[in-house]
Amino acid sequence: MADGILPKWDEPAIRVLMMPRDTNAHGTIFGGVILSYIDQAGAIEARRQGCQLMVTVSMDKVVFHAPVLVGDLVSFWTETMRIGNTSITTKVVVEAIRVGRSSERVVVTEANVVYVNLGQDGKPTPIIRASSELSASSPAAL
């Protein structure tokens, strides 16, 4: 546990089968849908690291490498990059398993997301680091 950061999970924070309702005018998945899942996946990672009530401050370095297609199985892999006193930066890498081609995995998007931990008063409050026993927990355990 370097710098008090729990190690990466060996499974994604979120996995979603993309459906037609989320398509844009080009017939691919709307980028805003992917951004929403990125925000949720990053928040799951922040919670695992000790944040309780948090808000998203920024999404940085969002790169859309390839389109997401209807029927793709999309995984949102997370890693904590930095934990400050009241803020946490997570990296989210989005990988798609193409429909009908289970051996084809494509990194479609990645982003860094910064969250601030809030107290009951809605003001920034220090992050209380999670115990190392959570490092072996899966996203479902949270």
Image (spheres, grey):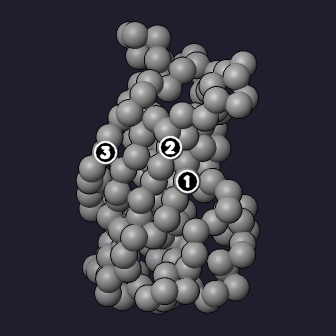
Q: In the image, residue 39 lies at what x, y percent?
A: 43, 52
In this rendering, would 70 be left or right of 103? left
Residue sitting at x 67%, y 79%: 134
Considering the image in quadrants, where does the N terminus appear?
Answer: bottom right
Residue sitting at x 63%, y 25%: 98
Q: Which residue is mark 2?
A: 94
Give the SS element for disc 1.
strand
Circles 1 and 2, Cβ within 8 Å, touching? The answer is yes
Q: Which mark is residue 60?
A: none
Q: Which residue is mark 3?
A: 62
Q: Which residue is mark 1?
A: 77
Instruction: Indicate the quadrant where residue 6 lies.
Output: bottom right
Choose the circle earlier in sequence order: 3 or 1: 3
Spatial CA distance of label 3 from label 1 is: 14 Å
Outermost residue toward the front in this view: 103
Circles 3 and 1, Cβ within 8 Å, touching? The answer is no
Q: Amino acid at mark 1?
A: Trp
Q: In the image, residue 31 lies at what x, y percent?
A: 38, 30
Residue sitting at x 36%, y 50%: 111
Q: Amino acid at mark 3?
A: Val
Choose the circle earlier in sequence order: 2 or 3: 3
Residue sitting at x 60%, y 44%: 75
Choose the circle earlier in sequence order: 1 or 2: 1
